[in-house]
Image (cartoon, grey):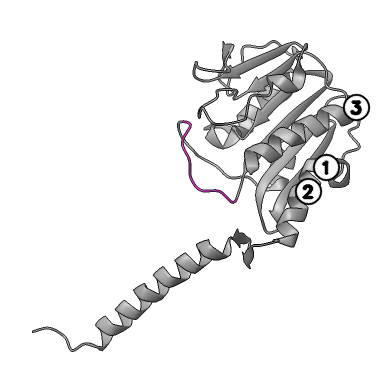
Amino acid sequence: MAQRVIRNFVADLARLVEIPDPVVEFGSLQVEPEQDADLRTLFAGREFVGTDLRPGPGVDRIEDLRSLSFADGEVGTALCLDTLEHCEDPVGACRELHRVTAEGGICVISSVMLFGIHGYPNDYFRFTPEGFRSMLGGFDDVWVAGIGDPAIPMQVVGVGAKGRRLELSLERLPSLSAAQAWWDAADGMIRVGPLRHKPADLATILVRELIRNLRHRVEEALPPRR
């Protein structure tokens, strides 16, 4: 769900606020063939550059987030989506994103939080909403949000703007509002803390755990072997 939500979030944002050119995506490599993560279709007819640390589908230009080759203020809109957790220096990366974003431009970031370790090729960090606010602190206006449990969100997003106000809220972004409503309602799901499980999946987990615990109790009750 995270990929779909973030893609729709970017589409909502493009309808709501001015998105200056050029639009540059940092972390544009289409790693999995089945991923619907190509953002070019959201910016048809616009100047769009896809960058990543590695070559491959969706990548126009090789860039290292820790030291970008773009000039100061060269990027109108910087997109860095579900990528910062794979960067060894995300704080430095956000400084670079701030440096290359033009006056009047925006920087959009997102990352998973309640999510397992995954490659691409390595996975280093998880971020809180306030962590994102801190990393975007060089921008003139910053908006951040966590989607899911307030104590441990599924996804965290942030937008920073230079020389302009964003006037953003969760209510003005339908995709994020819908994702939060889905999590709150848990329709057809069973709530376990910050998690949502399908009943059949949870039943499988519970049966497996009951068998494991019963086996352990039986082993404890047996006399020790000589």
Circle 1 residue: 174
Distance between the alpha carbons at the discs numbered 3 and 1: 22 Å
* Residue located 76% across and 36% down the image: 9
Distance between the alpha carbons at the discs numbered 3 and 2: 27 Å
Distance between the alpha carbons at the discs numbered 1 and 2: 6 Å
Report the mark closest to the observer, 3 or 2.
Answer: 2
Q: Are marks 1 and 2 in contact (CB under 8 Å)?
A: yes
| 18 relative to 153 in the view: left or right | right
- In the depicted structure, whether residue 130 falls above or below residue 135: below
Instruction: Classify mark 2: helix, strand or loop.
Output: helix
Kindly tell me whether residue 225 is visible in this rendering: yes
Kindly indicate the quadrant of the structure image that contains residue 172.
top right
- For the C terminus, the quadrant is bottom left
Kindly indicate the quadrant of the structure image that contains residue 18.
top right
| 4 relative to 169 in the view: left or right | left
Circle 3 residue: 164
Where in the figure is residue 119, as x and y percent of width and height? 46, 36
Disc ID at residue 178: 2
Nearest the eye: 139 or 35: 35
Where in the figure is residue 195, as x and y percent of width and height? 61, 60
Report the mark closest to the observer, 3 or 1.
Answer: 1
* Residue located 85% across and 31% down the image: 140
Q: Residues within 10 Å of mark 1 (few under 14, many from 20)?
A: some
- The earlier-in-sequence mark between 3 and 2 is 3
Instruction: Classify mark 3: helix, strand or loop.
Output: loop
Question: Of the residues shown, which amino acid type is indicated by label 3?
Answer: Arg
Where in the figure is residue 38, as x and y percent of width and height? 64, 24
Q: Residues within 10 Å of mark 2 (few under 14, many from 20)?
A: some
SS majority, magenta:
loop
Where in the figure is residue 73, as x and y percent of width and height? 76, 14
Nearest the eye: 108 or 65: 108
